[in-house]
Amino acid sequence: MSFGKLERSQGSAPMSDINMTPLIDVMLVLLVIFIITAPLMVSSVQVDLPKASATASNAPKFVEITIDRGGQVFVEDALQTTESLDLLLDKTAKANPEAEVRLRADTTVPYGRVVEVMGQAQKAGLSRIGFVAQAPDKAKS
């Protein structure tokens, strides 16, 4: 009967190499974090707002305001001055405070002019403002 060897086998020698698995795991986690946060940190410089694929809201009552290339304001194809637009918006807000302002602006209109018209609507008490845009061309996509 043999009970085994009396000699002891040599144990494994200590490793002198770096274990790369935890380093790779940390690197991949950091990569995922950067991939997710990088688009949030970038400020878009060129914006083409007039094209959108969203549908228009169906508000029961609305006022459609159009701003042409020259910055002139039209309400239902009638040219409005700043004072007449204020009166019209006040009248609309008193008749229906939940009325929506649908704002159509040319792509070349300065952003400041659009903000002025939005400010007039909010000053009158109309806080629901929607932007009208055309659907993007499917041929370009």
Image (tube, rainbow, N blue to C red):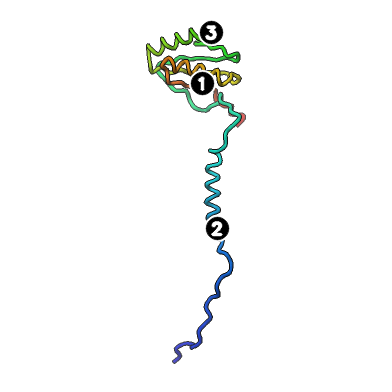
| Amino acid type of the residue that numbered disc 2 sits on in the rendered structure | Leu
| Left or right of 29 in this view: 96 | left
In the rendered image, residue 43, in percent from the top left (x then y), is placed at 57, 34
SS at mark 3? strand
Badge 2 or badge 3: first in the primary sequence: 2
| Amino acid type of the residue that numbered disc 3 sits on in the rendered structure | Leu
Badge 1 or badge 2: first in the primary sequence: 2
Badge 1 or badge 3: first in the primary sequence: 3
Q: Mark 1 against mark 3, which lies toward the viewer?
A: 3
Q: Mark 1 points at which residue?
A: 132
Q: Which mark is residue 79?
A: 3
Report the quarter where the C terminus lies.
top right
Give neighbour class at mark 2: few <14, some 14-19, many 20+ (Cα, 10 Å). Answer: few
Q: In this view, does 72 lie above or below 12?
A: above
In the rendered image, residue 71, in percent from the top left (x then y), is placed at 57, 14
| Amino acid type of the residue that numbered disc 1 sits on in the rendered structure | Val
Q: In which quarter of the image is residue 124?
A: top left
Q: Mark 2 points at which residue?
A: 23
Q: In which quarter of the image is residue 18?
A: bottom right
Please name the residue shown 60% across and 30% down the image: 45
Task: Confirm or deny contact between disc 2 and disc 3 (CB under 8 A).
Answer: no
Q: Is residue 50 above or below residue 39?
A: above
Please name the residue shown 56% across and 12% down the image: 72
Please name the residue shown 38% across and 14% down the image: 96
Task: Confirm or deny contact between disc 1 and disc 3 (CB under 8 A).
Answer: no
